[in-house]
Structures are given as C-alpha cells and as structure tokens.
Amino acid sequence: MKIVLLHTADALEPPVDPVLDQLTGALRSLDHEVGRVTVDRELEPVVTALRHEAPDLVFNIAESFRGKSALESNVAALLNLMDLRYTGSSPAGLLLAGDKTLTKQILRFHGILTPEFATLYRGAVDWAGDLDFPVIVKPPQEDASLGITSASVVHEIKELFGRIDALQTEYQQPVLVEQFIEGREFYVGVLGNLNAEALPVIELDFTGFPPDRPRIASWEAKWGEDGSGSGAEYAGTRSIFPTDLDDELAGRMQRVAVEAFEALRLRDYARIDLRVTASGEIYVIEVNPNCYLERESEFARAARQGGTEYEALISRIVDLASARYAR
Ligand SMILES: Nc1ncnc2c1ncn2[C@@H]1O[C@H](COP(=O)(O)OP(=O)(O)O)[C@@H](O)[C@H]1O
Ligand SMILES: [Mg+2]
C-alpha cells in the first residue's frame, strides 16, 4: 500500500521525534511505500499534500492542530471529509477521550470506576461530586502533563482556589478537580476492534521519587525540571513490568482497560492509565487513543512483552485499520 504518515510539526523540531523514522522503517519493512505529511498551522497545505499523495491509508499520529491538542479530533475529521482511510480512533473517540471530563462522564455511565470529581467553567460550578482533600486540579483538555505539576495536588481550600485561578488564567478552559487516588499507577495498552485485547500491564515506578513530592507523573517528572527530559533528579520516571502483581488483579485491570476502550468507542489501539488503591479498587485516570508509538514507549514495550515485536505491532495496526474499510 501507499501509506502517508500524518504527524504534527513539533515532531520535526530538533531533536526530531524518533517515532517518525521508526514508523517509516517499520512500514517499509512491511513493503509499504511511505510518505509524510505535516500538520501545522494551516489547513490548505495539509489538504493539498494529502490530495497529491493520494494514499491508500493514512497512519495518523497527529496530536494537535495549530498547537492545540483540543483540535486533535478535527484532524481525523478532515480525513473523514476527504474520504481517506486512516489508522486509530475516529473524531468521536478522539474527542471523548481527549476531554478528561467527558471521558469520566461516559465511563460512569458504563459503571467503570473513575475518581470522584467537580468541574468549573468560567468560575461557575458545572458539576460537584463528593470530594475530600487531597484533590488534583487539571486542565481537562491538555495532554502530556501540561498543567500538571506537584502544585496540582492540593490539600486545603486556599491552595485549591489559587490553583483554579492559575489554571483558568493560563488555559481559559474548564477546570477539572479530581479526588486524588493514593496508590500504584499502571498503564494498560489495548489493541484491536471487535475483539480488543489488553497488553501486559506496565507500572510507573515512583521509587526514585523525592519523598517530599506527590507521586504523580507531573510535567517535571516526565520531562525533567527544565523540560529536557534530563537533569532533574527524578526526570524520566521509570516504567517497569511488575513482578509482584497477582494474576487476578492484573486480569481485572486488563478487563477495565478493554471496557474503557469500548465505552469511548476507540479503534485500533490506545493506552489506558489506571491507579489502584491498596484495597484493589481500579480507577481509570485517563485514556490515550493516540498514545506514543515510539519503539521504547510504554505501549510498544508492552506489546513486545506480550510477544509482538515492533514491526508486527505496526503491521497489526495497519491491518486493523484496513479491515475497517474492506468491503
Ligand atoms: N485522580 C488522580 N489521583 C492520583 N494521581 C493522579 C490523578 N490524576 C492524575 N494523576 C497523576 O497525574 C498524572 C498526569 O495526569 P493525567 O490525567 O494522566 O494527565 P496527562 O494527560 O497529562 O497525562 C498521572 O499519570 C498521575 O500520576
Ligand atoms: Mg496521563
């Protein structure tokens, strides 16, 4: 097939995101012809390039438009309007999972556990559940821990108001206040459509964390205090395959992940982030339909752990997407 890799312009900013060459390499090793189209600030160049390439399939890893992750679903919508076939979730799935508040509302309807929450819109209360401190305050439409720092975990009213105020000024979005779930954090990849299957469970290891910081995958924890991914003492929080998990709990986590995937109408692949309390309650924290597909990403490592090497994983995603369009 002729496949176009559709990605956002920031992937090309030095250091160039290695996922571009890795996906290209994997697709070529599967005998596909591979082109690339960049999504940046203007619509016309994307339309023109896609028309010119006329691919059989678009491998869509575009995460934003004009730098806005809230516009991510519109990129997939454009592919629909252009009648192009593409990998990954539909605009509906990207929209539902891309908004943490909507995600929680849908999960609740399906009886899937997610932390208790309250939402604010322009200072007005939209919904207020039964919350106790500590809580975590987030911008509901951002990703990659933008807007989530140690200061996001708050323990009293004054801090809470200060945090809400700071977020509303910076992001001009609704604010999501969530019950802070003490416990271990796990990522579960899901692959498939009608028979979606969960990959082996991966754990975020916080043992290297400074004891005075809340144990969360904050922006500093993911990228380092200066954003470079190095330097800070707890940069690059490790993810590991836990060896002490009992099968029953791992199995339940995998079932919850597949249920969340189906509830949000996701397609092909996604990564579901969970927190598990000491008593074994599994909370869905977040759902990532356009999760990072880099060779050493949690998703790709989990696939490998389950016996699916990188090329086979990419091939599977292509097959899942192609099957959707088979007539
Ligand atoms: N309700 C919560 N309880 C405990 N920790 C949380 C909660 N929500 C988020 N976190 C922590 O913050 C991190 C980032 O939050 P998340 O909602 O996944 O945002 P992002 O889209 O930025 O990844 C999580 O990986 C987790 O460590
Ligand atoms: Mg997350």
Image (tube, rainbow, N blue to C red):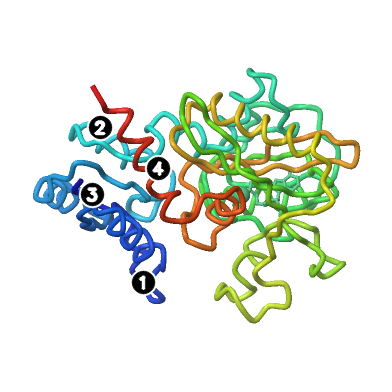
Look at mark 1 in the image and give the residue it sits on: 13
Look at mark 4 in the image and give the residue it sits on: 317
Q: Residue at x 79, y 51 (%)?
A: 154
Decide if residue 131 is on the left or right side of residue 3. Answer: right
Badge nearest the viewer, 1 or 3 = 3
Mark 4 residue type = Ile
Q: Residue at x 68, y 60 (%)?
A: 239
Mark 3 residue type = Ile
Q: Earlier in the sequence, mark 3 or mark 4?
A: 3
Tag shown at residue 3: 3
Mark 2 residue type = Asn
- Mark 1: is the Cβ under 8 angstroms from ligand 1? no
Q: Residues within 10 Å of mark 1 (few under 14, many from 20)?
A: few
Residue 194, compared with residue 189, is above or below; it is above
Do labels 1 and 3 touch, CB within 8 Å?
A: no
Badge nearest the viewer, 2 or 3 = 3
**Spot occupied by residue 254 in the image (x, y as percentages of width and height):** 67, 35
